[in-house]
Amino acid sequence: MKQSVIGMDIAKKVFQLHTVDQRSGKIERFKLRREEVLAFFAERQPYLVAMEACGSAHWWARQLQQLGHEVRLLAPRSVRPFVLRNKTDAADAQAIWTAVQQPDAHQVAIKQADQQAILSLHRIRAQLLKFRIMQSNALRGLFYEFGIVLPEGYTSLTKAVPNAFVDAENQVPHVLLESLREQWARVIRLDEEIQAIELRLKHCMRVRLDCQKIAKIPGVGLLTATAAVASLGDAKTFRSGRQFAAWVGLVPRQTGTGGRVRQLELSKRGDTYLRTLFMHGARSIIARGQKSEWVERLLARRPYNVVVAAVANKLARTVWAVLVKGSRYRAELFTACPVGH
């Protein structure tokens, strides 16, 4: 490469840098404290700075870009093979420097602050949802110990709880009954917090045209639209829809030897949360009767879950195509039957 390359291993307090002088071939290593990093790069000519896509990497990437440097974020799996000896900060920085110069190194799109904010809202919502499920299940189990059976599902539970507390007046000791009421109050508060986050996501969707475009695709709703746009970063980072689907983990894993390649189950690499949303979207397409001739043929000869994965793959490719090409969603292309299927 003509441009000077520097590999940087980021941390909370101490940063390790690795580079090679292009004229002399001398290896240079720097150990910097956190407050010294930006000053170090501000005094130097534009570098190609490579980092692993880990905690705070996107923030550092934006800061270095403002100083005129080119920044590339690498997936950790592209860096790991080049850590040849003991895993130290210096070895990691050298491995990053080596990995970024490989033609097949997988890059991660640098996310802007608003994209990171949307993803943070999704993470908070997912955590609150997990808490609500835990609290609801615990409440259901405690009532069951005293002969009161509550239905599964949050909506059904909400309707049944008032009558359950009426029945509990005569069956549950009062010393526990008040704690059960407090438990249910916590569940209600969690639900209100989840709804507040969903309102913020709806606002994000109203102000972003790209979210509105992909929301018109069947199976793509508020959560999938906002999460996909925020996770993608710059959609042009991916060369094709298939590469994006592979990044999400919606393509078969492959193994082979002697010229024979076998396709196995889904690779399940990449963002688990986004892959789950695409799978849920695919199930909704099939369940609501939005099936095309292609999907009908698949259902006739393949297991249901395999068909769901195939529809999720096509859904991810469609999202990528709409975002990259900037065109509107065309239903006739999504429902078209591929040749040979």
Image (cartoon, helix red, strand yellow):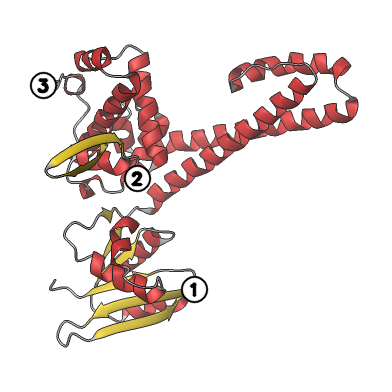
> Residue 323 at what x, y percent from top left?
24, 38
The disc, 3 or 2, on the residue closer to the chain's N-terminal end is 2
Front-most of residues 51 and 70: 51
Whether residue 207 is visible to the viewer of this picture, yes or no, is no
Q: CA distance from mark 1 to mark 2?
A: 28 Å
Image location (x, y in percent) of residue 115: 38, 47
Q: Which residue is mark 2?
A: 270
Instruction: For the N terminus, give its image quadrant.
Output: bottom left
At label 3, the amino acid type is: Gly
At label 3, counting other C-alpha atoms closer than 10 Å, the crowd grade (few under 14, some 14-19, many 20 or more) is few
Q: Which residue is depicted at the point 32% across and 56% down?
A: 77
Q: Could you tell which of marks 1 and 2 lies nearer the N-terminus?
A: 1
Disc 3 vs disc 2: Cβ atoms closer than 8 Å?
no
Query: Looking at the rendering, which quadrant does residue 207 occupy?
Result: top left
Vertical relation: 147 (above or below) 236: above
The residues bearing labels 3 and 2 have C-alpha atoms spaced at a distance of 29 Å
Q: Earlier in the sequence, mark 3 or mark 1?
A: 1
| Amino acid type, label 1 | Lys
Vertical placement of residue 28 versus 221, above or below: below
Specify few, some or many for label 1: CA neighbours under 10 Å numbering under 14, 14-19, or 20 or more: few
Q: Amino acid at mark 2?
A: Gly
Is 240 rendered above or below residue 287? below
Judged from this view, the residue extending furthest toward the front is 258
Query: Circle 3 sits on which residue?
Result: 340
Give the camera-side residue of 110 and 149: 149
Residue at image position (40%, 81%) is 31
